[in-house]
Amino acid sequence: MSKQLDQLTDVFISDEVLLMCHNLALLTEKEEVAALLIGQKIIHENGITVSVTALSIPPRGEIKKDRVEIMSEDLVNAMEDAKHFSRVKGANLNVIGWYHSHPHITVWPSNVDLQTQLNLQNMDSCFIGIICSSYNTDTTTMMKENENSMLSS
């Protein structure tokens, strides 16, 4: 079976971006943080690879500590950052995803997260979302979630 050429097949995140995401999540244990992911889509014969090489960190706009919002002005500013990084790195970079933290809860997206992802994916079907849960200490959560999803399948 052949893969569709417009299908996202791989995601690569540079070590620097992973470290920045982790450090950003550790900045505060009390509220969510967010960033926009900058990089490029690489189209190849098997589909599309997204490569993340930089971050744009917007100011926190949402009042609630358990919510982050990506506003349209955040996207515009991130696009400007992508232009800057394009000049610096000599590559055609764009905003290709978003990242946010869930400090003390699981990595599973909330309804708000899913709606945000849907809205952002309307711009580009390969727009990715990443959630980091740095302070969640329940090591059985993933097992429970996986067992529940298997049972409901």
Image (cartoon, rainbow, N blue to C red):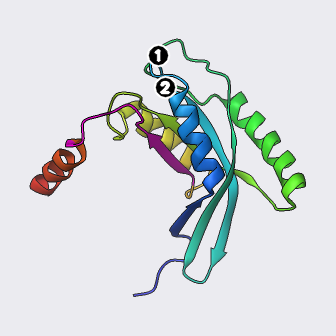
Q: Report how far apart the C-alphas of labels 2 and 1 lie in the structure.
A: 6 Å
Which SS does the magenta portion mostly show? Answer: loop
In this picture, residue 33 sits left or right of residue 2? right
Q: Is residue 133 visible?
A: yes
Q: Which mark is residue 32?
A: 2
**Where is residue 3 shown, x and y percent of the image?**
47, 80
Q: Which one is in front, 59 or 2?
A: 59
Instruction: Inspect the image, locate mark 1, and give the three-letter code of the amino acid beneath it.
Output: Lys
Q: Secondary structure at mark 1?
A: loop
**Which residue: 43% across, 20% down?**
66
Q: Are marks 2 and 1 in contact (CB under 8 Å)?
A: yes
In this picture, residue 114 sits left or right of residue 49? left
Residue 128 in magenta? yes
Instruction: Inspect the image, locate mark 2, and give the three-letter code of the amino acid beneath it.
Output: Glu
Q: Quadrant of residue 2?
A: bottom left
Q: Which mark is residue 153?
A: none
Up/down of 48 relative to 30, above or below: below
* Image quarter hosting the N terminus: bottom left
Q: Which mark is residue 65?
A: 1
**Boundaries of the magenta span:** 127-140
Q: Which one is in front, 67 or 6?
A: 67
Q: Quadrant of residue 21?
A: top right
Up/down of 16 relative to 31, above or below: below
**Which residue: 19% across, 43% down?**
140
Q: Which one is in front, 75 or 140?
A: 140
**Which residue: 19% across, 49% down?**
143
Q: Is residue 122 visible?
A: no
**Where is residue 119 shown, x and y percent of the image?**
53, 40
Up/down of 38 relative to 20, above or below: below
Count of labels in the image: 2
Q: Secondary structure at mark 2?
A: loop
